[in-house]
Image: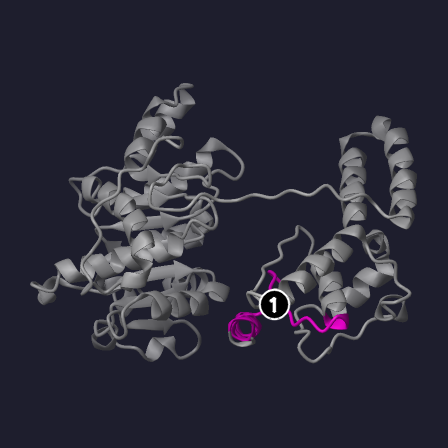
Amino acid sequence: MDNQPIPLGPPHPPGSTFNSRHITTNKVASSFESLLTNTPLGGLLVDDMGLGKTIQAIALIGNSKERLIANPHLSTPTMIICPPCLITNWQSEISKHAQAGALKAKSYHGPTCHSLSKANILKYDIIITSYNTITQEFKQTNTSTSCIFKINWHCIILDKAHYILSQYTATHHAINSLLSSCKICLMGTPIHNTIYDLLGIISFITQPQSSDQHSWSPLILRSLSKGSNDILHFALQHLSLHRTKTTHLKCLPTISHHYELLPLNPTMHQEYSTLYKKFLSSKSKGPGQLFRNINKLQICCNHHIMLNSIVQVDLEHHKGRSTQDNSPTITQTIVDVEKCVMSSKIAHLLQSLIKNKQSKCGPTKSVVYTQWTQFLDLIGIALAHHSIFSAQIDGTITARVQEKALENFFNNP
């Protein structure tokens, strides 16, 4: 399936709720919409990161709203459940990609969310909340009195659905107590540890809405216990859509990948050689020590100074700060950038960004990913030293700080 052209539905007319300038994404969303048409229970979208799962979900909500215009009394909001740090991102994406005023979205999160009545909630097309909010309300209130558990939602969309992989957590029980005839899961990695991780997702999607319906989950579990994956494969074939970045989508341009092999500078090469000798001598000390040393070698390829525990503490001190005002404060070891040995990766990154900044076509924005947040800290310091504005986002910052960082990124020229 991954290597075959994806069948695409016809584009929606200019009057649709989705912005016409994003018609390409709307075409891609048609594939997922076709899956849901054949599987009215819902589905699992596990496209690779960067293929627009969020935008596809928004297009799906907008398209379904158009079909319900003739029967407004049947229309109820769609609930989107995500980690708290993504609530503002969903609001921003809805505002950006939907026609002005076409989709009314409201956040149901924080201490004031309980002030929203059922009547108020029904005025919106989309309610965005967090897993923690649903779980806490499930624990603290009676589901028969809580308005969010009384509404039969048009659709429930779980972003980062791995939060419900385990069927035995309070979060899974809370999410399963919500009422909806259509449930959608968005995630990039459906299996984290074992194949049994999929049961929590399938249990949610196929949760019976009446006593005469049956969940697929027990049937799949019995099949797996007998060593057969056939029923699981059948379920995934009918419930999920998985497209990788190598999948051929006729309406999208091909992705261009460019790899560069960078030599280590003399200082880093010497440090790496020392670590490598220790690595060779530690092979007999068990797998734990082996993996720790491999990790150290990988870190050294980014910047050997990250192996210094004192530096790690100081990097933690300025985590999440914007470099717009050169605000980070750190030990003299790193602040004196001229004396600090520049790693090969940072030096090449700076060269590329500066070249891009001076381009005749005008500067463009860049996104830098790395496995280590400490390396992001070092990159941020180097960027500030060269008067390149940056905003750092990682899993340690609050939703408010992330929102501010994204705002600065999009609005700063």
User: Would you say residue 344 is visible in this rendering?
Assistant: yes
- Of residue 178 and residue 280, the one placed in the foreground of this image is 280
Residue 124 % position (x, y): 25, 72
**Which quadrant holds the N terminus?**
top left
Residue 399 % position (x, y): 53, 70
- Of residue 399 and residue 335, the one placed in the foreground of this image is 335
Residue 154 % position (x, y): 21, 58
Label 1: few (<14), some (14–19) or many (≥20) C-alpha neighbours in 10 Å: some
Which residue occupies 85% across, 56% down? 305
User: Would you say residue 177 is visible in this rendering?
Assistant: no
Task: Name the residue at the left extreme.
Answer: 70
Q: Which residue is mark 1?
A: 397
Which residue occupies 69% across, 60% down? 376
- Of residue 176 and residue 401, the one placed in the foreground of this image is 401
Task: State the image quarter where residue 167 is shown.
Answer: top left
Residue type, label 1: Ile
Which residue occupies 39% across, 20% down? 228
Q: Which residues are magenta?
A: 384-410
